[in-house]
Amino acid sequence: VSRVRTHHLQQAKDNGQRFAMLTAYEQYTAEIFDEAGIEVLLVGDSASNNVYGNETSLPVTVDELIPLCRAVSRSAKRALVVVDLPFGSYEVSPAQAIETSVRFMKEAGAHAVKMEGGAFYADYVRAMVQAGIPVMAHIGFTPQSEHSLGGYRVQGRGEDAQRVVDDAVALEAAGAFAVLMEMVPAQAAAEVDKALRVPTIGIGAGASTTGQVLVWQDMAGLRGGKLAKFVKQYADIRATLSDAAKAYADDVRSGSFPGQEHSF
Ligand code: KIV
Ligand code: NA
């Protein structure tokens, strides 16, 4: 199987096709999703709250994401592996963004990076692309800015729709190979997709984007608690694992595991 590359995502948009993206943070899910034909695997900074046990994506560090990204890039034979630049690892300057991206590509096998932020970051994207780093932009609701945005809120409602379009256009002009939109009204996201040549990816952004992305623990039902409106749950892995753990513990306590067939 040949590697999915950024030009294949462009081809998808040019041909009116869609592609799927999921987060992955370690070996087995990377393998499973890769073999299932998911085109893009994202080592998201959502590892902060889906792997490391934090409340938000803010605390996770480059040093914490590197081993996860390495595991995913070693395990994915076909998917394009994209990693998030975590909060605090790029904002200071284009040079800082390049240094962090280079670490992910050299030390962890990332094929591309994703960076949160609007038109302000166009100069950063331009410098990164010049350095040979493929950049996926992330606009709309950007979780790293939750404290300045005033919580988890849809972005680009009403008159704000134009700002989302302007951000996307500026980031495309700077060389981003794709623009991801989070929690943007479907109508605004459709306008962005129409305004851009490059593919768009949505999460809570309606059905008009070229690709869709979900956090895998939400998609497969590993995470407990209330799900966001934009999530569709395709499995109940949490219940499956819980049942398995309880059955194992019952067998151990009753003495029925291990059996003779498990013994030497
Ligand atoms: O970190 C993440 O998982 C993400 C996606 C949900 C877009 O950025
Ligand atoms: Na993220």
Image (cartoon, helix red, strand yellow):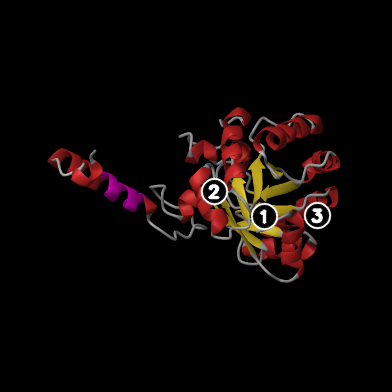
Give the number of the disc on residue 156: 1
Judge depth for marks 2 and 1 and give the one in front. 2
Q: Which residues are magenta?
A: 238-245
Q: Which one is earlier in the sequence, the residue at label 3 or at label 2?
A: 2
Which residue does the numbered mark 2 point to in the structure image? 30
Task: State the separation of the CA atoms marked 3 and 2.
Answer: 32 Å
Q: Which residue is depicted at the point 69% across and 57% down?
A: 2
Residue type beneath disc 1 = Gly
Instruction: Say if mark 3 contacts mark 2, CB within 8 Å.
Output: no
**Can residue 160 be seen in this snapshot?**
yes
Residue 129 lies left or right of residue 225; in this view the side is right
Q: What is the crowding at mark 1: few (fewer than 14 residues within 10 Å), some, or many (at least 20)?
A: many
Q: Residue at x 72, y 60 (%)?
A: 9
Instruction: Give x and y (percent) for residue 5.
Output: 73, 54
Pick the residue in front: 161 or 100: 100
Residue at 84% of width from left, 48% of height from top?
A: 174
Asked whether residue 241 is drawn in magenta, I would say yes
* Numbered label tally: 3
Q: Which quadrant of the figure contains the N terminus? A: bottom right
CA distance for labels 2 and 1: 33 Å
Rendering coords of residue 141 (x, y %):
62, 48
Screen quadrant of the C terminus: top left
Q: Amino acid at mark 3?
A: Val
- Counting from the top left corner in percent of width and height, residue 177 is at 77, 52
- Front label number (3 vs 2): 2
What amino acid does circle 2 point to?
A: Ala
Could you say whether the residue bearing mark 3 is in a helix, strand or loop?
Answer: helix
Q: Is residue 25 magenta?
A: no
- Residue at mark 3: 169
